Amino acid sequence: MRQYYATIQRFSIVLALLIALVTSYLNYPKTAALFIVVALVGVIDVFWLRGSK
């Protein structure tokens, strides 16, 4: 179950970064910044989960 969760987590991080790239390309800096923050929180969460095993 935890492995499944980690896969979803990684996918959502990649998705958030892709959306950030697209929105920054389309000149929506606030939206891009929001998704970059979401991706960063996801990355921190993954490493924190890995550390707490």
Image (spheres, rainbow, N blue to C red):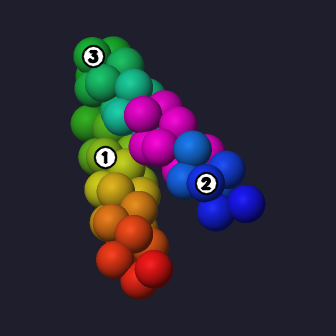
Tell which circle, 1 or 2, labels the residue nearer the N-terminal end: 2
Q: How many marks?
A: 3
Residue pushed farthest front?
53
Residue at the spot x=39%, y=69% of the render? 50
Q: How packed is label 2: few (under 14 Cα within 10 Å), some, or many (20 or more)?
A: few
Q: Which residues are magenta?
A: 8-15
Q: Quadrant of the C terminus?
A: bottom left
Question: If you read the primary sequence from the N terminus, does the residue marked by circle 3 or circle 2 appear first?
Answer: 2
Q: Was residue 11 drawn as part of the magenta stretch in this picture? A: yes
Task: Give the prevailing secondary structure in the magenta stretch.
Answer: helix
Q: Residue 53 got which mark?
A: none
- Residue 31 placement (x, y as % from top left): 39, 41
Counting from the top left corner in percent of width and height, residue 22 is at 37, 19
**Mark 3 = which residue?**
25
Mark 3 or 2: in front is 2
The residues tagged by marks 1 and 2 sit, at their Cα atoms, a distance apart of: 24 Å
Residue 3's disc is 2
Element on which disc 1 rests: helix
Residue 43: x and y, percent? 34, 57
Callout 1 amino acid = Ile
Q: Is residue 10 above or below residue 28?
A: below
Give the residue drawn at x 41%, y 62%: 46
The answer to whether the residues at label 3 and label 2 have Cβ atoms under 8 Å apart is no
Looking at the image, residue 2 lies above or below residue 51: above
Can I make out residue 22 in this image? yes
| Percent coordinates x, y for residue 41 in the rendering | 37, 63
Q: Is residue 26 above or below residue 7?
A: above
